Amino acid sequence: MRRLRSLLAAVAVTGLLAGCGAFGDSPTADQEPRAEGQAIRVGLPTGVTSFANADIAVATEKGFLSEVGLTVETQNLRSGVSVVQGVVGGALEIGGASIEPVVNAAAGGGDVVIIGAYTDKLTVSSVAPASVQTPADLRGRQVGVQEVGAFREVMTRLVLQSAGLTPNDVQYIPVDAQSYNAALVDGRIQNAILQTEQAVAVQRDHPDMHVIAEMADIVPDYHYGTYFVSRAWLDANRDTAVKFMTALTRAHRFMYENKDETVKIVAKATEFDEQVISEAYDRLLGQQGVFPVNTGLDKARIKATMRRMGELGILENQPPAYEQLVDAGPVIDAVDSLGVQTGDARWR
């Protein structure tokens, strides 16, 4: 565990604040200011866009971004750690990542601030072959993670903790996000944290695969996805941030009201077939309501998540104050312009 924490510290502080390519895929920062009218560069935390991040594909396809005068260039990176490095280093204007690397960067003195959420609820499951019936059966097994301190490794810790296990009880195997299903099927790993569409696909094609834990059940008060920027960029571009969050909020609302069209757009973005995405849609939007239609930045949920990070030992410094970590102004302004959406228990 001491070695694991040392690795995490290197990721959470040195890598994030220096903007270095700790895992070889951080974008290169521009040295000159970007000209007005150039595309806003947005980093996403998986090599192929996931359903959870597909709101930006919807916002692009439906013209919500262009209607507010924005052109967006998305860059798919290896993990949220790499996205944070890109924002801190100036290679990205906006980052999309799970909350953990953003919190660690802010706790270490990094110039990052959350302005919105893609899915504030967890959208992932712990999936294993038939030989693993419960989380307790993971002892001595090989489990897939992206990077220590990145989202799926954190979720793996929570699964292990639910069974009284620690990372010392398993063997971590590095796997890219889009390769988890293949690694499960060929036996390289015996557990993976999968996005809903990944879990649907692997269970359909390989009935021996099954969910051993739903992360939203293990940690129902855990905040998942964030859109974040550098505070310096936000100070100079607050109007652009408001426009961005307006387009994304419209996309979330559109997704709930237009299943068929959403499924087509998300299937193209994620590279899964429409049958898989349709089933994932029913779970994520129909049942769970994972995309916020209002601000999606619940102070209690975010503070509870930081407390959980501390309990897991993945927060090396004191957690930042909520007001340091979050500037809800852009998304509040966006919701004010669109009108607050009420009348459904899923709406946040």
Image: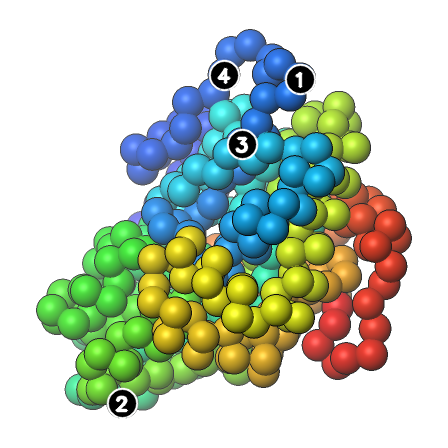
Cβ atoms at labels 3 and 4 below 8 Å apart: no
**Mark 3: few/some/many CA within 10 Å (<14, 14-19, 20+):** some
Q: CA distance from mark 3 to mark 4?
A: 11 Å
Amino acid of disc 3: Arg
Q: Is residue 304 visible?
A: no
Q: Which of the colour schemes (rainbow, by chain, secondary structure, one colour) is used?
A: rainbow
* x and y, in percent, of residue 185 in the image: 16, 72
Q: Give SS at disc 1.
A: loop
Residue where numbered disc 3 is placed: 41
Amino acid of disc 2: Gln
Residue where numbered disc 1 is placed: 36
Front tag of 3 and 1: 1
The reply, left or right, for residue 345 in relation to residue 127 is: right
Badge number at residue 30: 4
Front tag of 1 and 4: 1
N-terminal of the pair, mark 1 or mark 2, is 1
Badge number at residue 347: none
Which residue is more in the foreground, 259 or 41?
259
Which residue is more in the foreground, 263 or 81?
263
Q: CA distance from mark 3 to mark 1?
A: 13 Å
Residue where numbered disc 2 is placed: 133
Amino acid of disc 1: Glu
* x and y, in percent, of residue 9 in the image: 43, 43
Q: Quadrant of residue 310?
A: bottom right
Cβ atoms at labels 2 and 3 below 8 Å apart: no
